[in-house]
Structure formats: C-alpha cells, structure tokens
C-alpha cells in the first residue's frame, strides 16, 4: 500500500464517521455565532474609530479574533479527531494487519497525519470564508490576514502531529485524546509562569507555542517561528513512526 492509498483510506474513515461531522458542525456553528457578534461590535464602533489615527480595522477586530477563537477550539477538537488514528487501529486489531502486510511504519503515520491535516484544512477554510464574505465591503489588510491564516494552519498541523503521536503511544482512543489535549495545552501555557515573573524573551518563552502563534496573528512572520512548528511536527511524527516500527518488531 503506497502513501496515496493510505491517505485515501484514512480520509474515507474520517468521512464516514459521524463524530467528525458533528465536531465540524458544532465548531462552525459556534464560530459563526462569534463572527456575528464580532461584526456587530465592529459596526457599532465605526463612528468612534473614524476619528482615531491608525485605528484597528476589519482584520484586527473581526478576522484575527475569529481565527483566535478557532485556535482555542482546536485544543479540544484536534485531539478528539486524531485519537483513533493509531490507537483505534491498535484496539480493533487492524494495525497488526497493516504491519503484517508490509506497509512501512512511516507510510502509515504520514498517511494518517496528512488525512487529519486535510480534514482540518476544510474546517479552517470554512472559518476563513466568514470574514472573507464581507471583504468586498471593507479594506482588509491582506498581509496580516495571510500571516494569521498561516499561523492557524501551522498550529493545526502541530496539534495534529501531537495527536497522532499520542495515539501511537496509547492503546485506547480516549487516553490518546487526553494525552493530546494535555500536551497541546502544556505547550501553549508553558511560558505563563515566566510572563507573570516579567520574563518575555527567555528560553522558556521560545519553547511555548503561544509565542509563535501570537506573532503570526499579529502579522509578524519570521523564520524562527516557522522553524519551531517544523521541528515540533517532525519530532512528533518521528516518535510516532518509531513507536509503530517497535510494534512491528515485537510482532
């Protein structure tokens, strides 16, 4: 089985599971309600902002906060979607069948990871469609919106890699969801104590996910932030691959 076949198989599994559609519908519904409130607040404050120099615009007050709301929801949704990628296969006995058929561990992990990211891209695209639907009536800062979208995509990709790794190391999907949630939240809040102590540019701040996501949400794109996400994704997928390879060796 090649990578494309593995990807298609995992996408089919995600598509036929009602749970994924329920999460998608509930998430979009909640984000749609937030979008309505943000637009109402934006319109209500237009007169006040008109007399202010360099006042925040549509992207600052609507689009970026909406993507921020998506980021908050992602900590729960991504682990729930990714919990069965490998733990579910192991629990049902189908992972042993895949390994016995000679499919490389890296292909299994990458196929399942890519399918999860593609599924989340649909969620991101539907969320982004809300502020874009009113872009013709405003003067959006396309550069800042692109940077914020890139930040959310990288965050979703990183959380997906964490979810796949958690699923690879556990035998029950529910446990994988808990581990993925705790690791994601831990990376996000890692620098909370340092910030309260007045440290904003230390090593612990550089390790935290929130530091890099917030930079992108502000429209700041740097190689350091991009490299952080690449390293997290690569490390998680490497750990998951090694775990599945160990399962193969144990038989």
Image (spheres, rainbow, N blue to C red):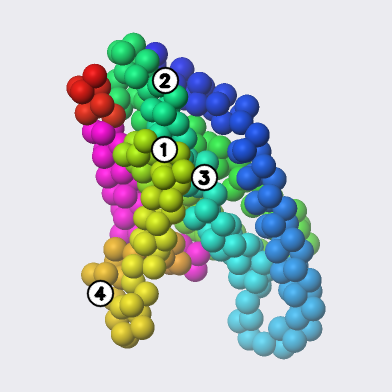
Callout 4: 10 Å neighbours few (<14), some, many (20+)? few
First in residue order: circle 2 vs circle 4: 2
Q: Position of residue 7 (x, y in %)?
A: 47, 25
Figure disc tally: 4
Counting residues from the start of the chain, the first of labels 4 and 3 encountered is 3
**Of helix, strand and loop, which one carries label 2?**
helix
Mark 2 neighbour class, 10 Å CA radius: few under 14, some 14 to 19, many 20 or more = few
Instruction: Provide the residue designation for mark 1.
Output: 172
- As for residue 223 lying within the magenta part, the answer is yes
Residue 137 point in image, percent of width and height: 78, 62
Give me the C-alpha separation between circle 4 and circle 3: 32 Å
Residue picked out by circle 4 = 202
Q: Which residue is mark 2?
A: 94
Q: Residue at x 45, y 46 (%)?
A: 177
Under circle 4, the secondary element is: loop
Q: Secondary structure at mark 1?
A: loop
Quadrant of residue 53 within the rendered picture: bottom right
Number of the front mark, 2 or 1:
1
**Residue picked out by circle 3:** 80
Callout in the foreground (3, 1): 1
Q: Which residues are magenta?
A: 216-243
Residue 82 pos. (x, y %): 47, 40
């Amino acid at each position: 089985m090649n990578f494309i076949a593995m990807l298609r198989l995992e996408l089919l599994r995600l598509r036929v599971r009602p749970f994924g559609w329920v999460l998608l519908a509930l998430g979009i519904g909640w984000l749609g309600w937030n979008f309505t409130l943000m637009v109402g607040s934006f319109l209500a404050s237009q007169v006040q902002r008109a007399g202010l120099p360099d006042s925040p615009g549509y992207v600052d007050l609507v689009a970026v906060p909406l993507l921020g709301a998506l980021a908050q929801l992602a900590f729960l949704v991504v682990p729930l979607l990714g919990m069965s990628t490998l733990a579910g296969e192991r629990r049902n006995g189908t992972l042993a069948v895949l390994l016995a058929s000679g499919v490389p561990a890296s292909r299994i992990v990458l196929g399942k990871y890519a399918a999860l990211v593609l599924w989340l891209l649909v969620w991101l695209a539907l969320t982004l469609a809300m502020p874009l639907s009113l872009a013709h009536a405003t003067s959006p800062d396309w550069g800042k919106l692109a940077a914020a979208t890139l930040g959310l995509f990288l965050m979703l990709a990183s959380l997906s890699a964490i979810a796949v790794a958690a699923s690879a190391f556990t035998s029950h999907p529910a446990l994988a969801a808990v581990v993925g949630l705790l690791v994601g939240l831990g990376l996000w809040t890692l620098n909370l104590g340092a910030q309260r102590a007045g440290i904003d540019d230390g090593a612990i701040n550089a390790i935290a996910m929130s530091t890099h996501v917030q930079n992108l949400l502000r429209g700041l794109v740097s190689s350091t932030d991009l490299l952080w996400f690449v390293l997290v994704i690569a490390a998680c997928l490497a750990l998951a691959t090694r775990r599945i390879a160990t399962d193969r060796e144990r038989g």
